[in-house]
Image: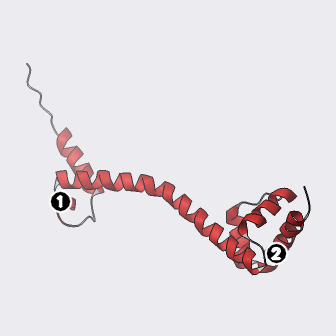
Amino acid sequence: MARVKRGNVLQKRHKKILKYAKGFRGSKSRLFIAANQAIMRAWRNAFADRRKRKRDFRRLWITRINAGTRQNGLSYSLFIHGLQKEGINLNRKVLAHMAVTDEKAFAGLVETAKAAVGRKK
């Protein structure tokens, strides 16, 4: 079998991984094997947490909307149901922003939803 000379391929790969691991503590920023394991874990967590961030923000928005609707005498679920009945298609991000910054407009939306829920099908 012929001898394989790798040249500087291995060195470049190690340098690349160690470059990504800059700022890690201890041997995780200096030794290739430790750095490689740390990098793989960090990237896996980053991938998962990009999706988790979306869930966390949705939970925050729902909490803010619920607080705003309860101040105006309605529950979150009835508020969303009332908006759907009226055909008002605002996402939860916008509704939460309105609940925090523009309370009069949000109160108007709550009244609209109350009226829609109060009516029969």
| Extreme-front residue of the structure | 120
Amino acid type, callout 2:
Ala
The image shows residue 18, relative to residue 5, as above or below, that is below
Amino acid type, callout 1:
Arg
In the rendered view, does 91 fall on the left or right side of 24?
A: right
Q: Quadrant of the N terminus?
A: top left
- Residue 94 shows in the view: yes
Q: Secondary structure at mark 2?
A: helix
In the rendered view, does 9 fall on the left or right side of 120?
A: left
Residue 105, label in figure: 2
Residue 54 sits in quarter: bottom right
Percent of width and height locating residue 25: 23, 67
Q: Quadrant of the C terminus?
A: bottom right
Percent of width and height locating residue 120: 91, 59
Residue 80, label in figure: none
Q: Which residue is mark 1?
A: 30
**Residue contact between numbered discs 2 and 1, judged by CB atoms under 8 Å:** no
The image shows residue 8, relative to residue 57, as above or below, that is above
Percent of width and height locating residue 96: 69, 70
In the rendered view, does 91 fall on the left or right side of 38?
A: right
Residue 100 sits in quarter: bottom right
| Extreme-top residue of the structure | 1
**Label 2 vs label 1, nearer the camera:** 2
Percent of width and height locating residue 108: 85, 74
Q: Residue at x 68, y 76 (%)?
A: 67
Q: Residue at x 21, y 60 (%)?
A: 28
Neighbour class for label 2 at 10 Å: few (<14), some, many (≥20)?
A: few
Q: Of the residues under marks 2 and 1, which one precedes in the sequence? A: 1
- Residue 87 shows in the view: no
Residue 84 sits in quarter: bottom right
